[in-house]
Image: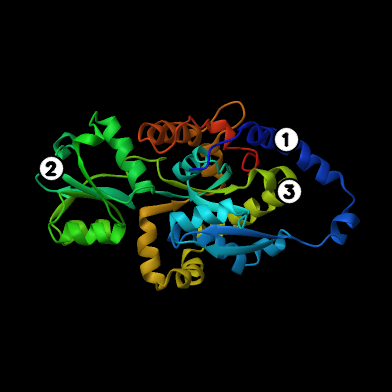
Amino acid sequence: MIRFKSRRGVQIATTGVLLTWLAAALLPSACSRAEPRRTYRIGLGPWVGFGPLYLARDKGYFAAESVQVELIVLTGLAERNSALRSGQLDALAAPVDYFVLSAGNGLPMSIVMAIDESVGGDGIVAKRSIRHFTELRGRRVAFQRGLPSEFFFRALLLENAVDIDSVRTVDMETAQAGAAFLAGDLDAAVLWEPWLTRAVEQGGGHVLASTRDHRDLIVDCLAFNPGVVARSAADVQRIVNAILRAIDYAKTNPVEASDIMAPYFQLDAIKFRDILTGLEFADPARNRSYFGSAQRRGPVFGVAERASAIWRGAGVVDRTVTANSIITSLFVANH
């Protein structure tokens, strides 16, 4: 585990964003045109919620904002952490709880916008005989450690006053956990679609809890390296603008947008739209409400603080990560 040397650098970078941005805006436009355009490398997983990033690229919205973006698919936690640690990425799309975890392990990022949120696409499926969280004590429950599945499960256990040590937890990838539940080898599993539906329809289970009733917890965000935010705030804003424009397009033109996004996830457009019923893209209004303002913080700050307490309680990090050190509402405030 890499130890966290100092959080002051993150705080200074965050508070210095506005001054850097204003200074950049005052530079002569001719000088800006003379400088070579930088390519910003954004990491993302193979999750349909990240479709708007492809949409922003293919619709030319990044180009319209005069920024160059390269999208890099990363499938595993180790791969993601390695890319961040080595400086191969300028930004990463991932859930809020991941950025708390990374900051606690010496990889601080600055969350600048929300991309999508789970509204039923993630949940806990259990045997029909299990009707309450207290009945999970002593039962075999599978989830993939270090991912939103673990965070979601731990958060709901805490809400229901159930000690995770009283549960027989099993570390499994989602597909494996879904298959194991269908085979009758598990009492419960934390899954996402389409496994959640399969477990109910084919495995004789029921949804004990899902993100449909527990909003805000699993929200995918875009976060930048704090150094990038400090040096290139204007470009960060342009990238945010382009993605929000893509999200607006996806909401007003769902068929055309899904035709563009679906192939990147090896799905046909109809199946893609089916899966989207379990999530919502975070449009400008949702971003404003989720991040809030300098005067009134939005829910994302509470989620980060909750994640910090959960990961520290799990022994995954050994220090509290303050929400203000990894989140800024500056880039969505005026949308």
**Whole-number angstrom distance, CA of label 3 to CA of label 1:** 11 Å
What is the residue that sits farthest to the left in this orientation?
129
Label 1 secondary element: loop
Residue 109 lies, in percent from the top left, at 58, 43
Residue 43 lies, in percent from the top left, at 55, 58
**Whole-number angstrom distance, CA of label 2 to CA of label 3:** 52 Å
The residue wearing badge 1 is 16
Do the residues bearing badges 2 and 3 touch, measured as CB atoms within 8 Å?
no
Do the residues bearing badges 1 and 2 touch, measured as CB atoms within 8 Å?
no
Residue drawn 70% across and 64% down?
Answer: 63
Q: Earlier in the sequence, mark 2 or mark 3?
A: 2
Quarter of the image for residue 25 reads top right
Q: Earlier in the sequence, mark 1 or mark 2?
A: 1
Mark 3 closeness class: few <14, some 14–19, many ≥20 residues within 10 Å: some
Nearer to the camera, 217 or 5: 5
> Which quadrant holds the C terminus?
top right
The residue wearing badge 2 is 130
Do the residues bearing badges 3 and 1 touch, measured as CB atoms within 8 Å?
no
> Compared to 163, does 248 lie above or below?
below
Kind of residue at disc 1: Gly
Residue drawn 48% across and 58% down?
Answer: 79
Label 3 secondary element: loop
Quarter of the image for residue 210 reads top left
- Taking the image as shown, residue 203 lies to the left or right of residue 292, namely left
Kind of residue at disc 2: Ile
Nearer to the camera, 320 or 210: 320
The residue wearing badge 3 is 232
Residue drawn 73% across and 37% down?
Answer: 18
- Taking the image as shown, residue 32 lies to the left or right of residue 279, namely right
Kind of residue at disc 3: Ser
